[in-house]
Each structure stands twice: as structure tokens, then as C-alpha cells.
Image (cartoon, rainbow, N blue to C red):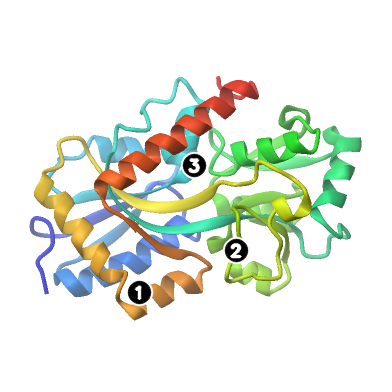
Amino acid sequence: MGSGPGSGTVSLIVPFPVDGVTDFTARVLARHLQQRWGRPVEVLNVAGQGGTIGTLQLLAAEPDGRTMMMCATGQATQNPAIDAALPYRWNDPVPVVRVSASALAFVVRGDSDAASLGELLERVRAAPRAHRIGTSGTGGASILALARLLESAGIALADLGRVTFHGGAAILEAVIDGRTDFAAQYVGEMGGLLRAGRLRALAVSGDTRAAAWPDVPTAAECGLAGFDLLGWTGIVGPRGLPASVIDTWVATVRDLTGDAAFVAEIEAMGSTVAWLDADAFRAALGAEHGIALATARRLGLRH
């Protein structure tokens, strides 16, 4: 059992409310890190402004390994691509290690009469201003993926009504209670809602169907393009983080990919273990941000 980076309690910031996939993953990871390091790892939910408040708290922390953050797709790459005035850039937090990945699912209320993604988007195309979507802060993980999907169906995102919520769980609840009409969020944060029939998935993102929901087609199988973003969670730190801290996190999370209990907990939420070391994680973030920035500019969503 290692001591982990530094000494004392490790604070793991989650820049979102509880009950989203980032929070779920952070709590699973924290339990396993405590077991391996023999020291407390506490999860701190610092929600607000689509992940901005928590990110700024991380960037203000001492680079001693005692304050780290579990980041995710929307706050890390999509929001910086959309909002030119955001007080951080995609590469301000130091990439340490990627932990998990999750497809997005395009969902409607469980009792919706929409038989397919194509049928629903036909309705939206006929009356876009009569339909509403939920976003988180600047946009969240799904806004650019949704914009590209809608574009492939001849629909402009700007023509829909938009309502802002705090976190993915609130966005999904708004679909359930009828305040919005559909959403695209991580499969990993909606498993219970899908199983209970409160939500119904019409498509998943990516090139292949989600292992947890093999009966749900990909958007490409539905004849629509652009819904290809795969969400992820990973660990980042403040500027100036020592290489020794990075190396410890990378090695520990790599070891956890071979821990059957850890893998089972990640897969139970509909995600997959998707380890990348610091260099590969940084490269993936840069590529993802570049695509998001080009999309935001082309669709007129950058502000």
C-alpha cells in the first residue's frame, strides 16, 4: 500500500453537483485510492457556472498534490471552445490521467410517443421554436454534439428554446418533468432512469453501440451525423504540479484498470475504464478542443 502523493488528506474537487457521472466516478475512485494509499481522499463538490467555479478553485490551489480535480468533457474542452471570455483555457489545468469514458445518449421522456430519433427530429424541424433543450452553464458536454446532430437534420440549435440548469442530473430531471423535450447526456449518469422507464434513449454517440444498452442504435445507424462525441472523466491539477505527483496518479490509476472491483463499479454505471497517461491525455484534450472550437465558430456558437 503506497502513501500516495504527499501526505495528509487529498481533496478531489468535482466542479459539478452530486449525482452526475463525474461525481459518481470521483467517489468510486476516491474509495479505491484511500484503500491503496492508506490516507483520506475526500470529494468536494464545488458546483457553479458549468464547472468554472471548481476549476478556478483548483487553479488557485498549491501545487503540492493535496488538491486535485476530476474534470469532464464539457468543462474541460467544450466550454472553453464556446466561451471566449471564460476565465480559464482548456490547457490551464495540468492533465494528469484519464480515468473513464462514456457515450452520450439522446433521450426523451419515458412515455414519449417518438418512435425513433429520426421521427422526433422531423417534429423539431417542423416547429423548432416549440421545442426546448437544457444546457449547463456555458453549454456543457453535449451542446456542440447536439448542435452538429441537429445540423445534420436541417435544424439550427439557435432556433430552439434553451433553459440553463446546474449539472447533468438537473438537465435529465427537466426532460422527465416536461420542462424540456430531450437531452443528450452521459450514459453513465442515467442508467437508473433508463431502467426505471423514466427516460428512453433514442440513440447513443460514437461509432458503436454502448455495451450497457445494446438495443439502442447509434445516431449514424439512424442516418444522422455529428453525434460522435464520447464523454470522459480524468484527473487534473494546478499549474506547477511536480512530476512525482503526476507519476503517482498515473501509476495508481493504471493499476486500478486491472482491479476487477474498480472496473465493475465503473462499468455498472454504463462507463468504461479508459486510462491514458499524462502525455496522451494532454494530446487527446488538445485534439478534442480543436474540433470543438472549429465547430463552435462554424455554427456561430462561440461568444
Say whether disc 1 or disc 2 marks the residue closer to the N-terminus. Answer: 2
Q: Which mark is residue 74?
A: 3
Q: Which x, y percent locates residue 256?
A: 28, 70
**What residue is pinned by disc 2?**
190
Q: Which residue extends farthest bottom?
A: 260
Vertical arrangement, residue 11 with respect to residue 94, above or below:
below
Left-right relation of 46 to 141: left
Front-most of 74 and 61?
Answer: 74
Q: Residue at x 29, y 39 (%)?
A: 57
Say whether disc 2 or disc 3 marks the residue closer to the N-terminus. Answer: 3
Looking at the rendered structure, the kind of residue marked 2 is Met
* Circle 3 SS class: helix
Vertical arrangement, residue 69 with respect to residue 9, above or below:
above
Tell me whether circle 1 and circle 3 mark residues in contact (CB < 8 Å).
Answer: no
Vertical arrangement, residue 164 with respect to residue 234, above or below:
above
- Which quadrant of the rendered structure holds the N terminus? bottom left
Q: Residue at x 62, y 53 (%)?
A: 205
- Which quadrant of the rendered structure holds the C terminus? top right
**What residue is pinned by disc 1?**
262
Q: Which x, y percent locates residue 43?
A: 32, 59
Looking at the rendered structure, the kind of residue marked 3 is Gly
Q: Residue at x 73, y 55 (%)?
A: 221
